[in-house]
Amino acid sequence: TNGTTGYLSPEQTYGTGLYQEQQSPFAPGCLEQSIEFAADALEELRGS
């Protein structure tokens, strides 16, 4: 990502030594929280 904070790795990949995990400033679970937030926001927009 050329020095940007673009990697959100799945929680289960943390601790495996993947490049994406090593470069990410985000904690385990951030991807899942982001997905949940986006899904909730879409549901709210749909009026559900």
Image (cartoon, helix red, strand yellow):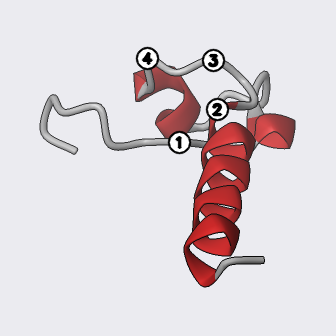
Q: Are marks 4 and 1 in contact (CB under 8 Å)?
A: no
The three-letter code of the residue at mark 3 reads Ala
Can you name the residue that lies furthest to the right here? 12
* Secondary structure category for the residue under label 4: loop
Q: Are marks 2 and 3 in contact (CB under 8 Å)?
A: yes
Q: Are marks 3 and 4 in contact (CB under 8 Å)?
A: no
The residue pinned by badge 4 equals 25
Q: Nearer the viewer, mark 2 or mark 4?
A: 2
Q: Mark 2: few, some, or many residues within 10 Å (few <14, many ≥20)?
A: some
The three-letter code of the residue at mark 4 reads Pro
Q: Mark 1: few, some, or many residues within 10 Å (few <14, many ≥20)?
A: some
Q: Pinpoint residue 45: horizontal percent, then vertical percent.
A: 55, 73
The residue pinned by badge 1 equals 8
Q: CA distance from mark 3 to mark 1?
A: 9 Å
* Secondary structure category for the residue under label 3: loop
Question: Looking at the image, which residue is at 69% across and 72% down?
Answer: 43
Q: Which mark is residue 27?
A: 3
Q: Pinpoint residue 10: horizontal percent, then vertical percent.
A: 72, 46
Can you name the residue that lies furthest to the front here? 47
Q: CA distance from mark 2 to mark 1?
A: 7 Å
